[in-house]
Image (spheres, coloured by chain):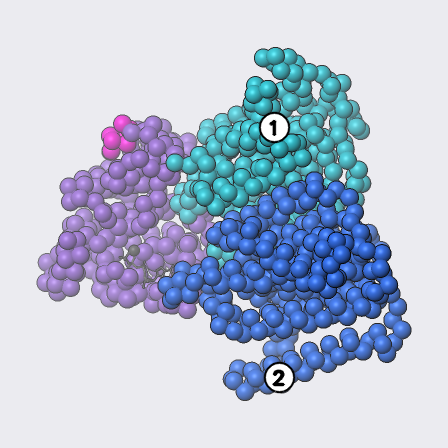
């Protein structure tokens, strides 16, 4: 593929992306879609943010963070605490992002010294330690001020989640296409070679880890404003890591489109199967996930490319 | 007081060794990380629970059945999940084994929830409440039984690995599969057997869990993390050191309970785990 | 007994062997010499089944080897001592040797073979309870040869077994190989950097260069040929220093 082809393609991607966002903006005002569809889309947007956040570390640095729930959960918890102590909800939301960053610096940075599987089990262990501690400290549900429900309708929440999703995609896009992104790819492909070329793996990994945590924290804050009442334990469970991980892997690691596709897939699958099968849908998701890892290691994006190439070669 | 901390630490530590030994074996032989290990522990516990409730088989006596059933499950899991991993380049297998067994957790845990509902289950055998005075400390009878079972199982495993040709071929494959295959050892078959044994050991640990504690469909993660901590304390893939590592974890946790209270039992282990991981990745007992 | 014909082998895109052909007859010692990176080890690894030829024929006692797994090829009677020192470090010397007799046929006669190996190299018997990882380099090399012999192979492949050993140890090792050959008539394919000793031991020799066989003939002829001497002895003696 030559340069003009490439730039034409990314131009096309911007157009398509813009149109899709526009549709999502206009959807609730032009049609009476109802609460159900809006909350489904809300979940979808949160998944986009979380799976992009996970993919930023997992896909671009090849380090599988199994502790994403800790950052999401701390976002949920801190936003709720700030908000209920009288701070403006939007400020609370932003603060949630920074709490996640602080957490990333305190407990995340030590784990950055770990590589590969050690990193994964280390992050999982810390996330579990945090979950158990939070369960001990905040065993009951937390409430936002009563005025909340007047100020925040489902529509406000919808637009906030949409906004965060778009923000996330832009941030990830800019990062990946910057010098950082190139360094990351070099590190992922061969850490020692990258080191010898003067690229500092630790510095770059820390940068994406902090950004990833920030995004997860913001997602947590938006989630709090959506739910109102939250039970901290539930927001720290590994499901909040595993869902985004599955979405990113099914979609395609190390791409921006991957987590988007994966989130669509995951949320729809979850919705269809959970209505008919209850928790049984996880069995199907799990099998699908295993099959994708084994036979489509680069996810649905890969199969899409393969199909397109087949199509092209036919012409 | 001190005596009690030590006694409980030792008991729980030995039990932890049983929980972790299968994971260590699998990692040592295949260099795969099986995150679903805890889910196999839970399944083993449910099988014991079933045998006890439906057929009235004493949990300690059900262990041989559990071992056999879980061994077969291990063979199936190898064929369906681990064997296809060979498609990947060697450098990618470990990471992918982690992802795949993670998918396996989703499948197994929810299958268990479907089969046995999400209730918490435990076995109340006739001797469940009984205690024995040991050096002036009251020790539950079941705990002592579990310790006996652990010694027996790890002893048999040791004999198997060091005295039989199959055991020796497993050890050889773990150290250097290329050299082993040059001696006519069928690596695939060795992996298959090792996987069966690993899952069988997890199942036996499940029986201990359901006797000493209780099980529920989503509690696998807890046991996986404990196994992982023991694994890292022992040094990855080291089987003999698992015993010491289990003891270390049991004692440290009891110390943590004494200092911080029971709610923080697991937190102590997890935080220590990450510290060890960072400071001494070769394990506590490696030379 | 062993017949390799027009074999091409690739590492990814890199061609490591080009139309390599060689034969080893029953009861012969054949040596394969050549500079570093010539493809000697690659040839042996192809025979054992670690590498699959892209084209060409590898036959042993009339049977094609190219579709068989490594352990199947071992069962057919081929045993190899690899270039890397690969004893099972955490196992005792005895356990290492016992594993050598893993295969059914050899297992039945393992006690006799063990006595024979111990006689050939008494140091292994002295150290039989010691962990293999604690042996010296020379002892480990002996153990590797002993372990390969425990499977009672029809064809023994030896890849640079003298590497890193002192001249005296090399001499002893070669003497042992010679004894083995004399007493059993075992067929041996020997890869060596130590060209002189290899040629003295072998019946025939092949010379490899950048993945192809460039010369073949009687070992004795090579020993007296000035050309070969200049081309290979020079290199190796320099490298040895
Ligand atoms: N695993 C591998 N991947 C890629 N290339 C390889 C690999 N192993 C060997 N090669 C290449 O194949 C060629 C032949 O290597 P081989 O090991 O067969 O040489 P050799 O004759 O045994 O050399 P030496 O005397 O150094 O052992 C070399 O150019 C080497 O770089
Ligand atoms: Mg070589």
Verify whether residue C125 appears in magenta.
yes
Q: Which mark is residue C179?
A: none
- Horizontal side of B232 relative to A69 (left or right) equals left
Residue appearing at x 42%, y 65% in the figure:
A199
Give x and y (percent) for residue C31. Answer: 24, 53
Crowding at mark 1 (Cα within 10 Å: few <14, some 14-19, many 20+):
some
- Residue drawn at (79%, 66%), measured in percent from left and top? A157
Residue on which the image places disc 1: B258
- Res A212 quadrant in image: bottom right
Where on the picture, by quarter, is residue B269? top right
Chain B representation colour: cyan
Q: Answer few, some or many: residues within 10 Å of disc 2's Cα (few below 14, many 20 plus, some between 14 and 19).
A: few
Mark 2 and mark 1: Cα distance apart in space: 63 Å
Label at residue A11: 2
- Asked if disc 1 is less than 8 Å from ligand 1, the answer is no
Q: Residue furthest bottom?
A: A4
| Residue B267 percent across, percent down from the top left | 61, 39
- List x then y, in percent, for residue B264: 64, 36
Which chain comes out blue in the rendered image? A
Based on the picture, tell me whether residue C17 belongs to the magenta stretch: no
Q: Secondary structure at mark 2?
A: helix
- Is the stretch drawn in magenta largely helix, strand or loop? helix
Name the tint of chain C in the rendering: purple
Report the span colored magenta: C118-126
Residue C206 against residue B232 in the figure, above or below: below
């Amino acid at each position: 593929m030559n340069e003009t082809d490439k730039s034409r393609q990314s131009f096309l991607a911007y157009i398509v992306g813009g149109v899709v966002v526009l549709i999502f903006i206009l959807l609730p005002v032009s049609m009476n879609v109802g609460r159900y569809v809006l909350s489904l889309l809300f979940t979808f947007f949160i998944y986009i943010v979380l799976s992009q956040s996970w993919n930023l570390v997992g896909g671009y640095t090849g380090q599988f963070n199994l502790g994403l729930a800790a950052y999401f959960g701390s976002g949920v918890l801190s936003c709720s605490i700030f908000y209920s102590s009288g701070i403006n909800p939007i400020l609370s939301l932003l603060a949630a992002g920074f709490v996640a960053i602080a957490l990333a610096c305190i407990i995340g940075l030590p784990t950055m010294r770990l590589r590969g599987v050690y990193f994964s089990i280390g992050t999982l262990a810390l996330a579990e330690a945090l979950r158990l501690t939070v369960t001990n400290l905040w065993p009951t549900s937390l409430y936002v001020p009563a005025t909340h429900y007047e100020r925040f309708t489902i529509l406000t929440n919808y637009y906030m989640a949409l906004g965060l999703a778009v923000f996330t995609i832009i941030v990830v896009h800019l990062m990946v296409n910057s010098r950082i992104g190139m360094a990351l790819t070099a590190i992922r492909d061969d850490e020692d070679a990258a080191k010898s070329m003067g690229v500092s793996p630790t510095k770059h990994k820390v940068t994406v880890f902090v950004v990833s945590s920030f995004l997860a924290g913001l997602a947590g804050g938006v989630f709090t404003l959506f739910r109102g009442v939250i039970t901290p334990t539930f927001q720290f469970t590994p499901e909040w890591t595993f869902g985004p991980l599955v979405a990113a892997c099914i979609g395609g690691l190390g791409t921006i489109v991957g987590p988007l596709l994966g989130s669509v897939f995951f949320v729809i699958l979850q919705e269809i199967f959970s209505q008919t099968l209850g928790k049984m849908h996880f069995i199907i998701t799990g099998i699908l996930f295993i099959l994708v890892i084994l036979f489509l290691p680069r996810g649905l994006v890969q199969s899409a490319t393969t199909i397109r190439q087949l199509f092209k070669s036919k012409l | 007081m001190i005596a009690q901390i030590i006694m409980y630490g030792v008991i729980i530590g030995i039990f932890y060794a049983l929980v972790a030994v299968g994971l260590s074996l699998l990692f040592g032989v295949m260099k795969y990380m099986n995150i679903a290990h805890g889910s196999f522990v839970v399944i083993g516990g449910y099988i014991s629970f079933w045998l006890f409730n439906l057929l009235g088989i004493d949990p300690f006596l059900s262990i041989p059945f559990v071992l056999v059933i879980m061994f077969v499950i291990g063979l199936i899991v190898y064929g369906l999940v681990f064997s296809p991993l060979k498609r990947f380049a060697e450098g990618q297998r470990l990471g992918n084994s982690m992802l795949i067994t993670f998918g396996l957790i989703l499948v197994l845990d929810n299958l268990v929830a479907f089969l046995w509902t999400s209730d918490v289950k435990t076995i109340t055998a006739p001797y469940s409440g009984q205690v024995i005075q040991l050096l002036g400390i009251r020790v539950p009878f079941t705990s002592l039984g579990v310790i006996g079972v652990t010694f027996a199982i790890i002893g048999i495993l040791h004999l198997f690995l060091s005295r039989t040709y199959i055991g020796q071929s497993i050890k050889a494959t773990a150290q250097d599969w290329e050299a082993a295959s040059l001696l006519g050892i069928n690596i695939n078959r060795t992996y298959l057997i090792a996987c069966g044994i690993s899952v069988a050991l997890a199942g036996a640990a499940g029986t201990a869990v359901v006797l000493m504690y209780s099980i529920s469909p989503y509690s696998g993660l807890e046991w996986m993390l404990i196994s992982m901590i023991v694994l890292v304390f022992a040094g990855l893939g080291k089987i003999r050191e698992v015993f010491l590592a289990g003891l270390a974890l049991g004692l440290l946790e009891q110390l943590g309970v004494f200092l911080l209270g029971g709610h923080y039992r697991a937190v102590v282990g997890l935080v220590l785990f990450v510290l060890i991981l960072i400071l001494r990745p070769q394990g506590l007992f490696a030379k | 007994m062993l017949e390799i014909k027009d074999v091409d082998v690739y590492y990814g895109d890199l061609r490591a062997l080009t139309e390599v052909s060689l034969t080893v007859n029953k009861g012969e010692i054949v040596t394969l010499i050549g500079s570093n990176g010539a493809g000697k080890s690659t040839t042996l690894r192809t025979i054992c089944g670690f590498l699959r030829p892209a084209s060409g024929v590898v036959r042993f006692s009339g049977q094609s080897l190219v579709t068989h797994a490594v352990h199947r090829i071992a069962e057919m009677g081929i045993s190899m001592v690899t270039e890397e020192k690969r004893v099972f470090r955490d196992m005792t010397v005895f356990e290492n040797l016992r594993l050598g007799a893993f295969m059914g046929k050899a297992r039945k006669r393992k006690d006799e073979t063990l006595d024979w190996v111990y006689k050939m190299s008494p140091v292994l018997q002295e150290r039989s309870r010691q962990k293999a990882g604690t042996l010296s380099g020379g002892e480990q090399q002996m153990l590797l040869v002993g372990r390969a012999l425990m499977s009672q192979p029809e064809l023994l492949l030896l890849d640079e077994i003298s590497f890193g050993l002192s001249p005296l140890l090399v001499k002893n090792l070669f003497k042992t190989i010679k004894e083995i050959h004399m007493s059993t008539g075992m067929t041996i394919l020997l890869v060596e950097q130590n060209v002189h000793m290899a040629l003295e031991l072998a019946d025939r020799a092949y010379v490899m260069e950048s993945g192809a066989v460039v010369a073949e003939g009687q070992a004795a002829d090579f020993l007296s040929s000035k050309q070969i001497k200049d081309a290979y002895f020079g290199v190796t003696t320099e490298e040895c220093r």
